[in-house]
Image (cartoon, rainbow, N blue to C red):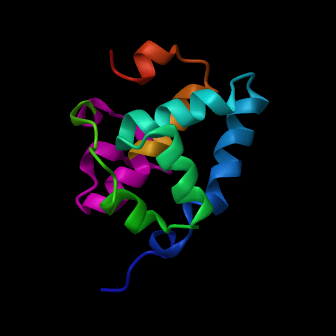
Amino acid sequence: MEKHKIYTMSVASVYPLYVAKAEKKGRTKAEVDEIICWLTGYSQEQLEDQLEKQVDFENFFLEAPKLNPSRTLIKGVVCGVRVEDIEEPTMREIRYLDKLIDELAKGKAMDKILRK
């Protein structure tokens, strides 16, 4: 089976879109970074390094220091698909990230986004 093209896209190529989506709704780049670091376990420095190295989505999640166990609490629909129903692990991680950025842009409180 052929991999979805998002797997080979660099996170750095999509990252500015995440930031723009958040900022358009009055949120910040720092909040986007906090979400990504919470989800993946990357430190701010490690995240910036991954972006600089143009790491693709597949390796970004494979190399993640510690995927947050609370990420399984993320529920809902992204691009017409329920994230909790996605079977393929890498695609599910990508959609978790998409869902968290959507929640940020919709004005949800950070405590709720980070499932505290």
Residue positioned 58% across, 34% down in the render: 32
Q: Quadrant of the N terminus?
A: bottom left
**Numbered marks: total:** 0
Image spot of residue 27 (x, y percent)? 69, 24
Can residue 10 be seen?
A: yes
Q: Residue 88: within the magenta?
A: yes
Above or below 98: residue 25: above
Image spot of residue 73 (x, y percent)? 26, 30
Q: Residue 106: within the magenta?
A: no
As drawn, the residue found furthest toward the bottom would be 1
Image spot of residue 101 (x, y percent)? 55, 36
The residues colored magenta run: 71-95
Above or below 17: residue 100: above
Image spot of residue 72 (x, y percent)? 24, 36
As drawn, the residue found furthest toward the right would be 24
Q: Quadrant of the C terminus?
A: top left
As drawn, the residue found furthest toward the front would be 45
Residue positioned 34% across, 45% down in the render: 83
Residue positioned 63% across, 29% down in the render: 30
Residue positioned 51% across, 67% down in the render: 55
Above or below 106: residue 91: below
Q: Nearer the viewer, residue 100 or 36?
A: 36
Q: Nearer the viewer, residue 74 or 13?
A: 13
**Residue 35 horizontal side relative to residue 62, left or right:** right
Above or below 65: residue 26: above
Q: Quadrant of residue 41?
A: top left
Can residue 78 be seen?
A: no
